[in-house]
Amino acid sequence: MEEKGCGYSVADLKKFQLEVISPERVFYTGEVEMVELTTTEGDIGIYADHIPLTTIVAPGIMTITEEGDQMKEAAVLEGFMEITQEKVTILAQSCEWPDEIDLNRAYEAKERAERRIQDSDHNINLPRAELALRKSLIRIKLAGK
């Protein structure tokens, strides 16, 4: 099936090597057609032959398109990404597949973060509490799909 005006079919998409590494494990490695995730500059979608880039990964949901409509989603909670001609490498502080997320723990983390933000005690690190809230919301959203 040819996309109108672009001269290629979905079957012609080039693949590239993706490697996602966390401190605990090699989270993902394989050939993919696309990866989408959130950086500190906004959301980014990467195809083969993307310009070289190094950027900071922000907490969000990473979507990996392996072939055609085969997609996997995971929570990626901060890190760095390097895009080269050969591959994309993501060094993440933490990565979780949906079935690895403890939903009760995520809800508890959300409530703790909201309490810390609402208390607005001068001893509270507000950016840290807001980041904890964002991470818990990402986990809840992903595990709830």
Image (cartoon, grey):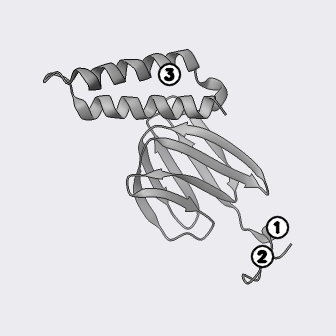
Where the N terminus falls, by quadrant? bottom right
Residue 25 shows in the view: no
Element at badge 3? helix
Residue visible at 44% across and 32% down in the picture? 135
Q: Quadrant of residue 116?
A: top left
Residues under labels 3 and 2: Cα distance? 41 Å
The label shown at residue 3 is 2
- Are there few (<14), some (14-19), or many (20+) residues within 10 Å of tag 1? few
Residue 103's disc number:
none
The residues bearing labels 2 and 1 have C-alpha atoms spaced at a distance of 10 Å
Amino acid type assigned to the residue bearing label 2 in the image: Glu
Can the viewer see residue 63?
yes
Q: Position of residue 48 (x, y in %)?
A: 63, 67
**Direction from residue 49 to residue 9 in the image, left or right:** right
Tell me the quarter of the image containing the C terminus.
Answer: top right
Q: Earlier in the sequence, mark 2 or mark 1?
A: 2
Reply above or below: 61 against 53. Answer: above
Q: Seen in the image, is 105 located left or right of residue 116?
A: right
- What residue is at 56 percent from the left and 60 percent from the top? 45
Which one is nearer the viewer's eye here, 85 or 123? 123
Query: Of marks 3 and 2, which one's residue comes earlier in the chain?
Result: 2
Percent coordinates x, y for residue 78 in the rendering: 42, 41
Query: For the view shown, which residue lies furthest in the right direction?
Result: 1
- Label 2 element class: loop
Q: Nearer the viewer, mark 2 or mark 1?
A: 2
Residue type (three-letter) at the residue carrying disc 3: Ala
Q: Which residue was labeled with disc 3?
A: 106
Q: Is residue 105 left or right of residue 130?
A: right
Q: Which residue is mark 1?
A: 11
Q: Of circles 1 and 3, which is in front?
A: 3
